Image: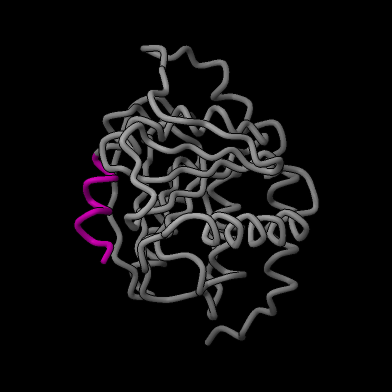
Amino acid sequence: MHQKLPKSIYLTLIILALALSFGLGYLYLNVPATKPITRKGKTSDHGTYLLYLPPKFNKSLPHTLVYALSPNADANALLDTWCLVADKHQWIVASSKVSRNGVDYDPILKQIKTDLNEIEANYTIARGRVVFTGMSGGGMGAYAVTYTYPDRVDALVINTGMMAYGGETPDYPRGKIAAFLASPSDFRYPNMQADYDYLTKLGWSTEWFEFEGGHTIAPPATYEQAAVWLDKNLP
């Protein structure tokens, strides 16, 4: 039987894992995009995060919120990753300018909570439709946010990322939703398979999406597949 792991120890493991993986998050920047991304909506800078609103955005309507975390604080890269999904599904996308590998993650977690409070105070976010996402170390950060603030996260989209040392934390939140974007040639592939099994056992609704390319951002078509699945499973 597992003993309950204190949150302080779990977060320490996350910080150590992020430090060990420092630099790996830069790999995807060297992969050439197949097609340049042109954002059709509005991007605004809020200091610690960028915010993207789709071109037909209606502030009076409730919207899904996607909060994205990068392994190297590259907020623009993840906005480019999510803007096509946002345009099609009319979702709001926030992307952190401070989340990165190899740093103390406690202040980042607190900042993300502050960012969420600010966004939810200024926009109508649909109940039960807050999605955290991240690539590589950003995915690990998304897991950390879910563990630290379980009442603020409804779903995860993890792109070639893992939980801290494979997770296996007895008090990890239960009954949420997770989409895994995995590449068979990625060195994190076995970790993601273990995380998928673990969250499924905890009663999460989980789905697996594969793409070719290794440890990199999944192609737009894979993100769209994940978005369609999320739309069907979120309230």
In the rendered image, which quarter contains the C terminus?
A: bottom left
Q: Is residue 52 left or right of residue 225?
A: right
Q: Is residue 103 left or right of residue 227?
A: right
Q: Does 185 sit above or below residue 192?
A: above
Question: Residue 167 or 106: which is nearer the viewer?
Answer: 106
Residue 230: x percent and y percent? 27, 53
In the rendered image, residue 219 lying in the magenta stretch gets the answer no
Tell me where residue 91 sits by quadrant.
top left
Q: Does 102 sit above or below residue 65?
A: above
Residue under the point 71% across and 56% down: 111
Q: How is the image coloured?
A: one colour
Q: How many marks?
A: 0
Question: Residue 220 or 16: which is nearer the viewer?
Answer: 220
Residue under the point 24% across and 53% down: 231
Residue under the point 28% across and 62% down: 234
Residue 103: x percent and y percent? 79, 47
In the rendered image, residue 227 lying in the magenta stretch gets the answer yes
Segment colored magenta: 225-235
Q: Does 38 sit above or below residue 108?
A: above
Q: Is residue 51 left or right of residue 189?
A: right
Tell me where residue 39 sits by quadrant.
top left
Q: Does 144 sit above or below residue 83?
A: below
Residue 155: x percent and y percent? 40, 60
Going by the picture, which residue comes out furthest to the front? 60
Majority SS type along the magenta span: helix
Q: Is residue 233 left or right of residue 181?
A: left
Question: Residue 218 or 96: which is nearer the viewer?
Answer: 96
